[in-house]
Image: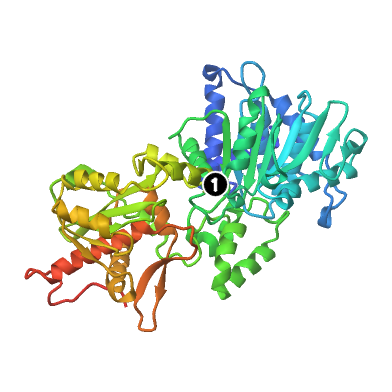
Amino acid sequence: MIDTKKHIAEVYAEKVLSGEVLTNELVQLAVKRYYADLENALDKGWHFDKKAAMRAINFIERLKHTKGEWAGQRFRLEPWQQFVLWNIFGWKLADGTRRFRYVYIEIARKNGKTALSAGVGLYMLFADGEARPEVYSAATVKDQAKICFADAVEIVKATDLKNYLSPFRNSIVYELKGGTFKPLSSDYGTHDGLNPSCGIIDEFHAHRDSGMFDVIKSAFGARKQPLMFIITTAGFNKAGACYAYRENVIKVLRGVNEDDSLFGIIYTLDKKEEWENPKMWIKSNPNLGVSLSVDYLADQVRDAKNRPEAVRNVMTKNVNLWVDAEKTWILDDVWMRCVSTTPKEVLKGCACWGGLDLSNVSDITAYVLIFHENDRFQLLPLFWIPEEKMLEKVRKENINYDKWVAGGHVTVTPGNVIDYDFVKADILRIVAEYDLRSSAYDRWNSSQTIIDLQNEGMAFNPFGQGYGSMSAPTKEFEKLVLTEKIEHFGNPVLRWMLSSTVTKTDPAGNIKPDKEKSVQKIDGIVGSIMALGEWMTAQADDDSNPYEGRGLLTLN
């Protein structure tokens, strides 16, 4: 039986574990982590300060709503919100400072995200006890940065805080303590001289890169207990900073990674198929029936069923599911079912065929080997990028090339342009381990390189990039993935490229891979399809052609 004398946050935790409150696996893991921490606190040198947790909760509940049907009424924090604040402000290190310095909350829209962020920001400004506190609402552009800040301004005006805090157009000033609360964005100019005690990042999924996060984090050094508060809905960019941070949060929740300074909780569905089931919506919307009506959500889902173009927005914003880019050819979850459980080493000495997609002088080059045995295929992708351009893309585009290089998934060539001699030497070294029969190549930008490799004894055949050449292997590739007859080794670069791949169709129904935006890269997927096409051509020329009598396996 649940002890009702316990704090609402504690009762919520018990109800989550008992199943009385319907949640997803990740919320359950966050609650289990809380209980495990209570058990292990002594060994860790932590303690839980209930008074500190309640102080923060009580402060925020004294604030007032400033818009909508509740305008003028005090905040009423829902149990899930109290659980979050309970953890953030209750856990202490041996020296009395807060344990959690980084917070990641992911939840569907209309669940009180911005109001909670503004409340946390005002607490950190006014009541945290920090000398000369600096609170920043951070985003990539001014308008987004001001959303949380603007809420905080109106809350100050509507409460007794106006007797202590002075709201201005671009700042809230706490004169007595020398504190400020400001919006911060990348288009505000220089950020020299920041000394943040708290950074609030709202809708992290919309950030182009981790720039604002990094700016704030790098300036935390002078503070004894800084707080990074991230709250966001799901998005589309699985190669971006938010999704990468989310993946780390999940690993921490599952005990794969260890980070005692990070608190994470993710309200989402367990399965994508649940988005149409009203009984499951509460998993993503713990405020369902409070700040969000069931009828509103039902209308959104109904509209999406009738208008396929609305599905992506409903999934990300209303049920908090990360989805692939619009018109994505092969969905990520389908692709990841094809991860091989066999080590790469077993491929040494095996027959294979290659597909080479050479880049321009400053971009990524891809060479993919495809192996075939026992009616199954294995893909082995290889990538190269100029070192200086790699660092530039990490900085400007927030593409994880640095992590991929560190993980051995991409090789850097020296300088700021692709070193073709380096690539050629690498290819010759790598393929020596396999029984390489032949490779396909795109004629564009590859003539001298191909000549040099041919002079080294490698067999290369030109492969057109139009519908006539690409359609059959593209359809075959799709078929093999959908039937899980092709395996890969989870290369994150190839996965990222697949997420950017769409297909174009001609009037005759032929297809070929394409990308919707020029900045996207699909070279590894093109190389994979060319390698498969090369294998298909070899089989057609072989008397033992396994397709003889049944034709090519293609999708209509």
- Residue toward you, 478 or 252: 478
Q: What quarter of the picture does the N terminus occupy?
A: top right
- Residue 222, placed above or below residue 263: above
Quadrant location of the C terminus in the rendered image? bottom left
Snapshot quadrant of residue 85: top right
Relative depth, front residue between 313 and 385: 385
Give percent across and percent down for residue 409: 35, 44
Q: Residue furthest left?
A: 543
Write the residue at 80% across / 43% down: 152
Q: Find the residue positioned furthest to the front.
A: 448
287 to the left or right of 544: right
Q: Is residue 428 visible?
A: yes
Q: Would residue 71 be found to the left or right of residue 354 on screen?
A: right
- Residue where numbered disc 1 is placed: 396
In the rendered image, residue 271, in percent from the top left (x then y), is placed at 48, 56
Residue positioned 35% across, 42% down in the render = 413
Q: Residue at x 71, y 51 (%)?
A: 144
Quarter assignment of residue 525: bottom left
The image quadrant of residue 77 is top right
